[in-house]
Structure formats: C-alpha cells, structure tokens
Image (cartoon, helix red, strand yellow):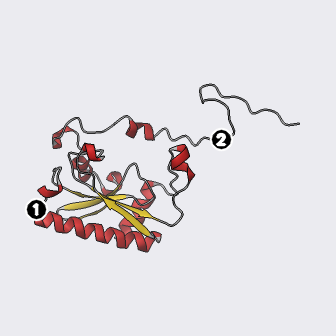
Amino acid sequence: MTSEPEQQIGVGAPDQFQRLWTPHRMAYIQGENKPSGPGAEDGCPFCTIPEKSDADGLIIARGEHVYAVLNLYPYNGGHLMTVPFRHLADYTELDENETLELASFTKHAMTVLRRVSGAHGFNIGMNQGSVAGAGIAAHLHQHVVPRWGGDTNFMPVVGHTRVLPQLLADTRSMLAEAW
C-alpha cells in the first residue's frame, strides 16, 4: 500500500516535480552586497576583494594591474572574471598596460580552464552599463565562462536553477594551482 507524500505547507501547489531549493541565490537577487553608489568607497566588491586573502576572496591569480577571481554567482563551474584593480566603469578608460594585462589574463584563463576542466568553448564578455546587464556597472569586469557540449539542460530553463558540480573553494584551489 502506497501512501500520499505528506504535503508541506508553503512550498507551492503539489505536483510531480522535485524542487532544488537554492536560497543562497536570494542574496544576489535582492542585491545584497551590491554597491550603494558608483564610487569605490560605496561598497564596491571588486575593490574590497583584493584586500582579502586569495582563498577568502576567491582570487585565482593577481597581476600588476588586474586579478582573476571566481564569480560568486556562477553560470557554470569555473566561471571567473578578470578585473582591473583600478575602479573604473568603461573599457575605454583602461590604460594600455591594463588593457594588455586584462587580455593576457583572459587568454591564460582559457588555457587553464581547458587544461583542468576540458572546457570545449567559452562565453567571454563584459556588460558595459546597467542597461547592458552589468550587475556591478561601476567597476569593469570581464566574464570568462567555460562551456561543454551538453552543458545546457532543462534546469535553467524550467527551474531557473544552475547545478554546479564543485564548491567554489575547491574550484579556486584547482585553478590557482594550475595558473
């Protein structure tokens, strides 16, 4: 004899779907830890991350002008960003040395991600301005998102959920060692 599963109050209408709850994402959705304004002193996380230890800041590598850091809210495992230390919003504001090192770090990130994770391809880009989708528009950052054949499935489309196979601290250690 099978019994009906016990109905939980407050979790929606009963149906045949399983739910993968990701309450930690609510902090991102609600804008927690987002800067209160455009200045470096307005709580810019890209300005405060370099003040932390590499492990605490999820920093993979530091250069003279830029650093590589894991995205705290990744689209895929290994999703990282290359970020200038200097607080500026627009790509055209980078000086030549910053531009060169940003490009060099991006190329190196691709090489490392291919070597350690077997990435088949990448989405690389930066959103310039909040109207273009920049979550933190006041501090330039370039995304490097590794992709694999078959990595797109029903979870993001139907469940608005990303399934990541590795903890950020473990990913950071692996990439930092390979850098």
The reply to whether residue 178 is in sight is no
Q: CA distance from mark 2 to mark 1?
A: 52 Å
The residue sitting at the right extreme is 1
As shown in the figure, which amino acid type bears the numbered disc 2?
Phe
Q: Residues within 10 Å of mark 1 (few under 14, many from 20)?
A: few
User: Picture coordinates of residue 48 (x, y %)?
Assistant: 24, 47
The reply to whether residue 118 is in sight is yes
Residue pictured at 42% horizontal, 72% vertical? 114
Residue pictured at 25% horizontal, 54% vertical? 141
As shown in the figure, which amino acid type bears the numbered disc 1?
Asp
Eyeballing the image, is 151 above or below 57? below
107 displayed left or right of 38: right
Q: Which quadrant holds residue 61?
A: bottom left
Q: Which mark is residue 52?
A: none
Q: Which quadrant holds residue 54?
A: bottom left
Q: Which mark is residue 95?
A: 1
Nearer the observer, 79 or 15: 15
Eyeballing the image, is 16 above or below 176? above
Q: Secondary structure at mark 1?
A: loop
User: Picture coordinates of residue 147 (x, y %)?
Assistant: 45, 64
Q: Quadrant of the N terminus?
A: top right
User: Picture coordinates of residue 12 (x, y %)?
Assistant: 60, 29
Q: Which quadrant holds residue 173?
A: bottom left
Residue pictured at 25% horizontal, 49% vertical? 46
User: Picture coordinates of residue 162 (x, y %)?
Assistant: 50, 50
Q: Secondary structure at mark 2?
A: loop
Nearer the observer, 91 or 5: 91
Residue designated by label 2: 17
